[in-house]
Amino acid sequence: MPSKKYKSWQLKIHEKTSGNPVCPKDREIININKVFSDKGFARGMLSLEVRCLQSDRGCTWVGQLRHAEEHIGECSYEDQNCLACDALVQRRYLEMHQNDSCPKRIIECAHCQDEYTFIEKQRHEEVYCRRFPLTCPNSCGKKEIPREELQSHLSEKCLMSKVTCPYAKAGCLFEDKRVHLIDHSEASIDHHLEMTFSSLLAAKTELSVCHNGMTELQQKFHESEENNRKLSQLVEDHREQIRDLTLETKRLGMESIQQTKTIEEMSKKNFLLIKQWMTDMDGKIAQQGTKIEEVHRKNLQLEREIKEKNSRHQRTSKPCQRLVDLQKTMELLMNQDDRKITLSANPMIGSQNTAGLQFKTESLSDTTDT
Ligand SMILES: [Zn+2]
Ligand SMILES: [Zn+2]
Ligand SMILES: [Zn+2]
Ligand SMILES: [Zn+2]
Ligand SMILES: [Zn+2]
């Protein structure tokens, strides 16, 4: 009885957990509720003798079904995944695969001894390997030059590299492959000596010019130093002056503040004085007004008296000259009073003319008194 069939039968029975299981023999749907575990039948089944699943590949294992799973776990013909590249390889070949053919096996570079996976080998050798052997690109015939030494080979040793003469700085214009340099050097000993001598002379002249220049520069340097010293002194002097000026400015500032305060105080005092003076003036003007009223009153009385005397006199004789003069004086005084009142009513000139007003009023009083 081939084990495959048993496995399929086993699987069908296990379907009872997911759907309707089917009998593998007659394809009839099995009623789950009527299924029960028959231990005796199971024992009989598990004791059946089976061959290994990989018998086609050559496995000769034959044993009881109960031991089949255990064998599959160690059968050397079973496929297993390579842990590095994930490929399926028969268990018996796995070690060989990992050592010799797995593309992800770790290998060591034969040239530089670095380690990398097999699939990186080509890139390592083409780009990264510092000891990978190369052939000279100038076709000088040299092979196996480690990559890290190729540059120095080309610049220092390769006979096919283009070079200039070591006496180029002395003026030699040779430029050819290194292989020709030896011949050139041998053939040009005199020429090279001549050129070296000429360039030495030129250098000497140049040196002399430089020396003169140096002396001049030294002189200038000393002059500059002296100038610097003087400037430093000047700066120091100015610093002192600035210090003094700053102090003076501070002092003047304080003084200015003090003066401002004094001016403010004086302004306040003046204001109070002017106010007091104006109050006094107002009092005096009021007094003068009273006096003027009194004069008016006296004038009116005198006028009345004069009129009375006049009428009496007209009846007896011609008018008394003394009375006529008195009347004229009264009219004149009346006119003066009117002007005085106009003057006091003008606020623009009131304070300035107060003295004059006082004088006039006083003289007026004198006149009326006499
Ligand atoms: Zn086997
Ligand atoms: Zn592998
Ligand atoms: Zn390498
Ligand atoms: Zn070369
Ligand atoms: Zn040369």
Image: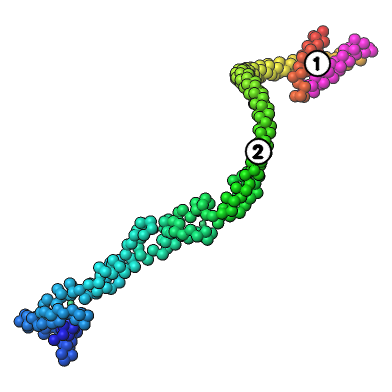
66, 184: nearer the viewer: 184
Report the side of 186 relative to 311 (left or right): left
Q: What secondary structure characterizes most of the magenta part? A: helix
Q: Is residue 308 above or below residue 54?
A: above
Q: Is residue 103 above or below residue 65?
A: above
Which residue is pictured at 27% across the width and 73% down the height? 89
Which residue is pictured at 61% across the width and 54% down the height? 176
**The residue at label 1 has a CB less than 8 Å from ligand 5:** no
Report the side of 68 relative to 341 (left or right): left
Looking at the picture, how far across and down is residue 342, in whole percent? 80, 23
Amino acid of disc 1 = Asn
Q: Which residues are magenta?
A: 317-345
Which residue is pictured at 53% across the width and 51% down the height? 155
Q: Is residue 325 above or below residue 234?
A: above
| Distance between the alpha carbons at the discs numbered 2 and 1 | 142 Å
Residue 325 within the segment the image draws in magenta:
yes
Looking at the picture, how far across and down is residue 68, in whole percent? 14, 77
Q: Read off the residue under disc 2.
A: 197
